[in-house]
Image (cartoon, helix red, strand yellow):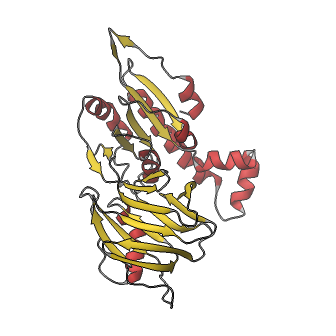
Amino acid sequence: MSAAAVVGSMATPIRVGVTVCPRVVVVTRPTELEALLARHGTREQARFFIEQRGRSLPEIDERHARRERALGLVWAALPLRWRRSYVGREDLSRFVFGPEDVIVVVGQDGLVANVAKYLTGQPVIGVNPDPDLYDGVLVRHAPEAVRDLVRSAAAGRCGEARTMVEAVTDDGQRLLALNEIFIGHRTHQSARYRIRWGETEETQSSSGVIVASGTGATGWARSIARQKGAPAPLPTPTDGRLAFFVREPFPSHATGTAIEQGAFAAPDVLRICSEMNEAGTVFGDGIEDDRIELQWGMRLHVGVAPTRLNLITG
C-alpha cells in the first residue's frame, strides 16, 4: 500500500456515546526507491544513476515492495472503528500527537528515535518490514503482530520505559533525543567550551561531546568507547543513567583533558558553556537540521529527560 493510498483511506473520528475511539498513527519514511524517484524524476534516470554506482534497480524495487507489503498488512490489521492517521518522517515536527494515540512505526530502528522526541509517553510499536536489512533493536515486531499489539497498547499495557536525553539552554531552548545528543562545532572543527562534571570544571578543545542513553550505547557512544580503549560506563536502556564522552580532547596551556568520560543519573547534569564565536551546535539522534545554535557564552545543561519512550516489546 502506497503512502498516497494510506492517506486516502483515513477514517474520520467515530464517537461511541461520549467516548472517542483510540487513534493509531502509522509513521514511516520514504524508501530508497521513493527518494531516488523524487530526486531523478523517472525510473530510467534513477536506474542510470544507481547502475553507475554498481547497484541494480530490482534490488531497490524489492526492498520497496517489502515495506509496502508491511504497511498494507499493518493498515489492514487496525480495528475498523478506530481512527487512523499516517505521517511521514518529514512531517513529524508539524504533526500533533494526542494523549490517546497508539504509534506504529514501520521502518528502521532510527525511525523510532525520530518520533520519540515528539511523544509524551504514548505507546510505540516498532514494525520491521525487512528483517534482512534492519537489526530490529527497536522495531521488533512482524506486521502480523500488530492486530493484537495495538489492542493491548490501547488498553493500557505498559511497555519498556526507555530513558531519553534532554539538553536545555539558559534561554529556555530544549532538545530531546532517544540515542544521544551531540555538542560541538557545526562543521566538526575543534569546539571550544567549558565543561563541568560534579565538582570538576575545565576549558576544553575537542571534536565535541556525546551524551548517550542506554539505547544509544549500542551505537555512536559504543564506537567512541572502543576507540578510547578503556572500559566504558555504558548504561542499559532502562536503568535511568546517561554516559558522556569527550571526542579527542586536546591538551594545551589553555585546555585540559581531565574530564573525558563518565556516567550519571538524575538529578545530576553535565554543564557546558560555549566559547565558540560561531557555528556552535547541539543536535540529537544524528538529525542536524533540528538543532540548537550554541552561541558564545550560552550555557547548556544535559541530563535525563523527564519523558521516556514507552516501547511495546511484546
In the rendering, at what x and y percent does residue 246 appear?
Answer: 43, 75
- Image position of 83 (left or right of 91): left
In the rendering, at what x and y percent does residue 184 appear?
Answer: 53, 69
Q: Quadrant of residue 65?
A: top right
Q: Is residue 4 visible?
A: yes
How many numbered badges does the structure rendering display? Answer: 0
Residue 14's place in the image compared with 89, above or below, is: above
Farthest-out residue, top: 17
Q: Is residue 133 visible?
A: no
In the rendering, at what x and y percent does residue 247 appear?
Answer: 46, 77
Closer to the camera in the image, 222 or 139: 222
User: Residue at the spot x=31%, y=54% of the render?
Assistant: 163
Residue 269's place in the image compared with 258, above or below, is: above
User: Residue at the spot x=57%, y=24% of the render?
Assistant: 8
User: Residue at the spot x=50%, y=32% of the render?
Assistant: 86
- Image position of 302 (left or right of 279): left
In the rendering, at what x and y percent does residue 55 appear?
Answer: 64, 61
Residue 269's place in the image compared with 231, above or below, is: above
Closer to the camera in the image, 100 or 41: 100
| Image quadrant occupied by the C terminus | top left
Q: Quadrant of residue 97?
A: top left
Closer to the camera in the image, 126 or 176: 176
